[in-house]
Amino acid sequence: MRVGVLTGGGDCPGLNAVIRAVVRKGVQEYGYEFTGYRDGWRGPLEDDTVPLGIQAVRGILPRGGTILGSSRTNPLKTPDGIRRIKDNLAKAEVDALIAIGGEDTLGVAARLHDEYGVKCVGVPKTIDNDLSATDYTFGFDTAVGIATEAIDRLHTTAESHMRVLVVEVMGRHAGWIALHSGLAGGANVILIPEQRFDLDQVCAWVTSRFKATYAPIVVVAEGAMPKDGEVVLKDETLDSFGHVRLSGVGEWLAKEIEKRTGKEARTTVLGHVQRGGTPSAYDRWLATRFGLHAIDAVRDGDFGLMVALKGTDIVRVPISEATAKLKTVDAALYEEVGVFFG
Amino acid sequence: MRVGVLTGGGDCPGLNAVIRAVVRKGVQEYGYEFTGYRDGWRGPLEDDTVPLGIQAVRGILPRGGTILGSSRTNPLKTPDGIRRIKDNLAKAEVDALIAIGGEDTLGVAARLHDEYGVKCVGVPKTIDNDLSATDYTFGFDTAVGIATEAIDRLHTTAESHMRVLVVEVMGRHAGWIALHSGLAGGANVILIPEQRFDLDQVCAWVTSRFKATYAPIVVVAEGAMPKDGEVVLKDETLDSFGHVRLSGVGEWLAKEIEKRTGKEARTTVLGHVQRGGTPSAYDRWLATRFGLHAIDAVRDGDFGLMVALKGTDIVRVPISEATAKLKTVDAALYEEVGVFFG
Amino acid sequence: MRVGVLTGGGDCPGLNAVIRAVVRKGVQEYGYEFTGYRDGWRGPLEDDTVPLGIQAVRGILPRGGTILGSSRTNPLKTPDGIRRIKDNLAKAEVDALIAIGGEDTLGVAARLHDEYGVKCVGVPKTIDNDLSATDYTFGFDTAVGIATEAIDRLHTTAESHMRVLVVEVMGRHAGWIALHSGLAGGANVILIPEQRFDLDQVCAWVTSRFKATYAPIVVVAEGAMPKDGEVVLKDETLDSFGHVRLSGVGEWLAKEIEKRTGKEARTTVLGHVQRGGTPSAYDRWLATRFGLHAIDAVRDGDFGLMVALKGTDIVRVPISEATAKLKTVDAALYEEVGVFFG
Amino acid sequence: MRVGVLTGGGDCPGLNAVIRAVVRKGVQEYGYEFTGYRDGWRGPLEDDTVPLGIQAVRGILPRGGTILGSSRTNPLKTPDGIRRIKDNLAKAEVDALIAIGGEDTLGVAARLHDEYGVKCVGVPKTIDNDLSATDYTFGFDTAVGIATEAIDRLHTTAESHMRVLVVEVMGRHAGWIALHSGLAGGANVILIPEQRFDLDQVCAWVTSRFKATYAPIVVVAEGAMPKDGEVVLKDETLDSFGHVRLSGVGEWLAKEIEKRTGKEARTTVLGHVQRGGTPSAYDRWLATRFGLHAIDAVRDGDFGLMVALKGTDIVRVPISEATAKLKTVDAALYEEVGVFFG
């Protein structure tokens, strides 16, 4: 049995832990051989492979990123893409494919399996934690940890200068990183894409915080948006889809808060540091278990499925079900956390 | 409504986060007043209280330990203990009690409620993660993170000198910290109390690691034990219960490995650093949610229950059920992880 | 003897360590009393004081920021500022003043002492490490550590996507943070304000790095500037002094590199996280020793001086000498480090 | 020109940074070739070499330990050792040798140069910071940082249980790590090998700390010793030289404090975690500069010298001078820090 492995989409701490677990168990327990594909779907599309064995995965557990490289190449949008992948897999005598990635990468795997009979097993990966069908995804805990540490640091500078500090974190469509790091970091306002925010309310929270003689920290997900009509975003802070541009909302918000409350406000955009570097212990544990169970699914012939976390168990669910719907922060949870605002 | 709060047993990162959440929500949403009891059950027993309000819980979220202090005082073993507690609560006009603690502390709360009608809500706390009825307890993730970072550091020193490094971590009755940190740290052997170890097997794993030209890391829970008959532990490494004495098994193991394999071996006993200091973001999230839900249980009149994590939800379960049985590592999970041994 | 203490300018990890050392030694060894002034020179100017004793400084050693608050208020630019300060000090019976701050704060202290006879002792503080007369200032090591950790994290994301990552760090007039963190983080290009950079050279280094099949990290100080004539910066990236606007150069550089090399480039602006949070062990050591020696200077009647680090010794130098000239990275040191570029 | 490189003695964060700098500058600027010797002096003694070039040093900057391995082999104690080293160097056409190590390793290099004409350049390495002729050695800052973080963590557990926590850190002959980490960590007692301690005084400090309602942290260097006559150490805590055995003084001290003050006391022995893992930014800077200057010394034909830090400069000093005398904590500095005891 020869198994192909690829990692697609944005990089994420824990990818290497998955690869290592897949290969270690596959080689040692089942005697499988492996083919690494470079840069996500570009690999099988262009037959760009790399040898993958016990030696290649030594020492990679604590390393961020992915030794296989990644890309956003989508074979469904490439002329003749599917046929080329099938041909290349056949040529390389690859019997099954483990695709590690987010909504897009797994969506391709689901169609390859469901419509073209390619034997795929999925491993969910999104730093934003917004894939349904799994309680958590690896990389998320690391990102939350990095953001929380940054918020911890910003408290002292906010207090020393009695300034508002706006921290923009990742989360274009879901506010999980903002919610978790904002709560863990003791933020006074947390703004997420799922709930359009009322600028007057934000300013009221900020002002009330100063009355308690403490300086406020505002955590905002990059995809958070103010309520319609209330403010007009300038063109340059909207992208071509009319969304607030990456890196835009934090700076815009600081300016508005400063203007409306008269308090000095500064922005920090955490950016790519949230997705790089060594994975947290939690993410290494989760990613490793995902890898061990993915290779078991291959052995069991359970294709078209992806591994997922349910409580403390790793289970298997249809990929198509898992990618059908974004997992967002529901109103009840946001309200639960809201007791700390202001 | 006046609510008493106490923290019992060994300290644990996240205790302050629970206290803060209880008080913030209790005061702001429900208008409750609070009485802090010092040093676990010693507080209500001796009527030793401390004022507890919004001001007292400011800034404590990222701080380890507990602002209320802790102790192992057990009122059930104190003459007339229960009556004194009931009297002191009545005198202080405390209507309900939130007890944050492990098996012992919660066991007292359960009996106070079940047998004496004291209105108690429990919040589970054990750094060892060995309480059943909850997926995880706070403090555990922090401890695993600290142990993993230590193991990461020890790899380089092991490799540079081609030595065996034995790391003894917490876990007297359950191997959760050893299992998680050992896996996350890429250990080559993990020994837990649930599975008596075979010293020959351990030495075989150690030796095989050197053959692959890498130096081995052995993670051992403080409560791990060799198989009967195989070795004789000297008196001084057994405590009065016949258990391996705290700090004993790691050093003993290093000596045995050195003697049997001829390889230099060193021990590191992580000890109290595992339970101190700022909680991880995960533990702050979990502890805060436990606190928010505990005060909701008080409001709902749901006494005799404790809060617990199930998947991503906080639920309520009878305290007595939760403390009836230790949650240990089952054989299947240990075997799953075993693919990385050797 | 009553001693006033104030902290001026931008906050910096280690300020609290200085305050604690001054007060602990002053009270315990010399029996002094203390008056804390709020928000730098605003405190003595407006007679805004806060009690400062052993109790106030408990537990502040590991905390970032300053318990006294800070501001950029300059009494020399305030009508009648000097007289008001002298009057307020006299009214509060403050005999001597310890001013902890950077060029501006110390400049005021020097003039107060030299021209108006106010008994001042200075403690140098600049996160940028650009004060002459001292080998290092506290806060710098913490900032370098934070920036280095961020660069470490960015390596894996750069490699996984074969992208250029531009990291903008603090340093408006001096490139110390960029130089130290860039070297420690294994950056492939380091750009500092002291040496105008050649964009073609930067792009050549970036391209050569990709040829070695590694992704480049470019560390740029916020005050770094391209060579004249070579490129035209758009208005909005210049501030009113014609300098590159804070947060501007990193993004501009990424765009230019992307345009010229055809490689994807991303920017991370570290911003305020570099100056917040707990000080490194090095900074706690240095700040504490500065504090101990500053109170000794008060006892010795050595006014008009500031403490400074020379090798491993703390010495005293005239404040005016120390603030006369910015300490910048000299060409030889930059060249020494240049072996790692490309 | 072919240059040999070896690392001897205990491993230390920053060794790889030195090796990388030596090779990068040697190859790129001077066109040298390199031979890596394995495991310190064992390498040239047994002609055990490893290829060393640009590729071998990629990515090693942030990694602890040494890619060359280390040992305590002493060729001066090996029959015919010197002749074999000279022969092996000649056979491998190695023109000059860079020896990175502590007192022992450098002592061999000095004799090889002074007495046998082998062209050696030294790079000082000791995690204990006890080599004279250099202000600091790399590895020390990392060790102090790790110890300080541990002490930070232990504070909260000490306070929660009102216990004494004894932290044993490295330092057999010099108390630098204890002094720096104890000061940075806010310890209440610091005990170093240079000053025999008075157990009554230690207990008085501990007791006074409790009176201020805070729990004490005692930092003790592994080589610290009580005053003669005052106590009798049991045989098993003395090594064959009559020194307190490694890991002995901390536990002994906790027991004595507990017995004499009636307060619960616990010990944490930090051990090998202090010398492993990624070097701090400071150590990467220092180690890299040492490497750059060592290869310059080779180019300049400056043999028999070692590089050293003086203030912010790297200078060259005779190896023999540097190793003649241990750099210990002098009484004045210990007294300066003593203001924080109790």
Image (cartoon, coloured by chain):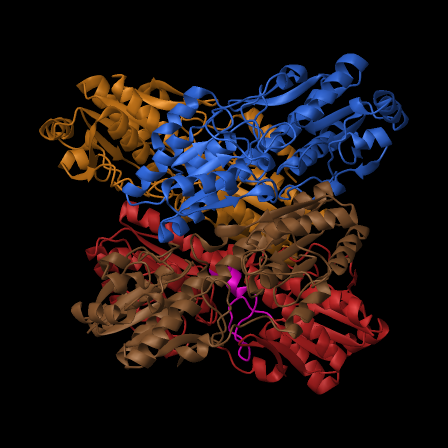
Chain colours: A orange, B blue, C red, D brown
> Is C136 in the magenta?
yes
Q: Quadrant of residue A205?
A: top right
Kindly identify the residue that appears in the image at 44 percent across and 59 percent down: C247
Whether residue C242 appears in magenta in the rendering, the answer is no
Query: Which image quadrant for residue A290?
Result: top left
State the residue in front, B41 or D219: D219
How many numbered discs?
0
**Towards the viewer: D68 or C183:** D68
Residue numbers of the magenta segment: C125-144
Q: Quadrant of the N terminus of chain C?
A: bottom right
Q: Main secondary structure of the magenta part?
A: loop
Q: Quadrant of residue A118?
A: top left
Residue D80 visible from this viewpoint? yes
Is residue D56 placed above or below A14 in the rendered structure?
A: below
**Residue C36 percent across, percent down from the top left:** 76, 65
Residue C158 image point, x, y percent: 32, 50
Image quarter where the C terminus of chain C lies is bottom left
Q: Position of residue A12 (x, y in %)?
A: 37, 39
Residue D53 point in image, percent of width and height: 22, 62
Residue located farthest toward the bottom when viewing the structure as drawn: C115
Determine the residue located farthest toward the top in the rendered image: B115
Tell me if residue A63 comes above or below residue D136 in the rendering: above
Q: Is residue B90 left or right of residue B74?
A: right
Q: Is residue C11 visible?
A: no
In the image shown, does B258 or D260 lie closer to the viewer? B258
In the displayed structure, would residue A268 be above or below residue B255? below
Q: Is residue A176 left or right of residue B292?
A: left
